[in-house]
Amino acid sequence: MTSQIRAIILDVGNTLRLVEKDPEFQAEAKQQLVNLVGAPYTPDDFVELLEERYAVLRKRAKNQWIEASEKEMWTKWMLPDYPEDKIAPLSSVLTRKWRDRDGRRVARHDVKDTVIELHKRGYTLGIIANTVTETEIPDWLEEDDLTDYFKSVILSSKVGVRKPGTEIYEIAARELGCKPEECMYVGDNPHRDIEGAQKAGYGMMIIIHEPATRAKYPTPSEFVPDKTIHNLSELLDIFPALVTE
């Protein structure tokens, strides 16, 4: 099965990076949300209001498999009662602080070495991520000197569609210059990651076992991965160097 794979495409949240709780960091993010827009609320009250609005936006995204841009998210959904000309220029930093309220996002210990080795072995690498941010993942790749290893980074907030819809997988395959059957996808959520990849005709799907995801989605999906791994570096045991003719 692995012999036909030429492109390895990875999820980010709970696959390449995990969220670490940091109360001081999270409190500062909430305070900055208030400060950025001059909201007449305490940080906790403001976040509670935004959580209610965010839930509506997420329900729409998940039901329709679409994603709002950062600008649309903040001007139309999160802060529609504020002047658009004030909020629109702040949308990117607001999204980053909104994400930071959950904690720090840190790469798994074996991400960098695994990515570099897979690239060295001849695989074309890409990312497909459902995310509301347009800058956080590219910035992280740049900070960790990983940008050049990924030929394509497909973010739902940029392309407007999201997993498990097949379109986002098809976009990635086209950008990587591969047929779907030559692509393999690694994610943590069988309800979203594996379903979309299988429906898009990807040649192989791998789940990385992540307790946080399993706690949220305890019921097994009808979409079964080809393999399950516990560490990203296990990909190196599955995918040998490509043979070049």
Image: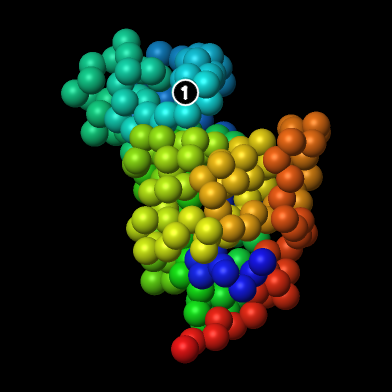
How many marks overall?
Answer: 1
In the image, residue 211 lies at what x, y percent? 78, 45
Q: Is residue 162 visible?
A: yes
Horizontal side of 123 relative to 156 (left or right) equals right
Which residue lies under the disc numbered 1? 64
Q: Kindly identify the residue that appears in the image at 54 percent across and 85 percent down.
A: 243
Q: Counting other residues with Cα less than 10 Å from the Cα at mark 1, is it few (<14), some (14-19), or many (20 or more)?
A: few
Residue at figure coordinates x 55%, y 81% from the top left = 242
Q: 133 or 182: nearer the eye?
A: 182
Q: Give above or below for 74 relative to 167.
A: above
Find residue 174 and report its horizontal and vertical position in percent: 37, 56
Name the residue nearer the viewer: 88 or 191: 191
Q: Quadrant of residue 217?
A: top right
Q: Position of residue 124 (x, y in %)?
A: 46, 70
Q: Residue at x 52, y 63 (%)?
A: 182
Image quarter of the N terminus: bottom right
Helix, strand or loop under label 1: helix
Amino acid, disc 1:
Gln
Position of 182 with respect to 174 (left or right) is right
- Residue 138 visible in this rendered orientation of the protein: no
Q: Nearer the viewer, residue 138 or 92?
A: 138
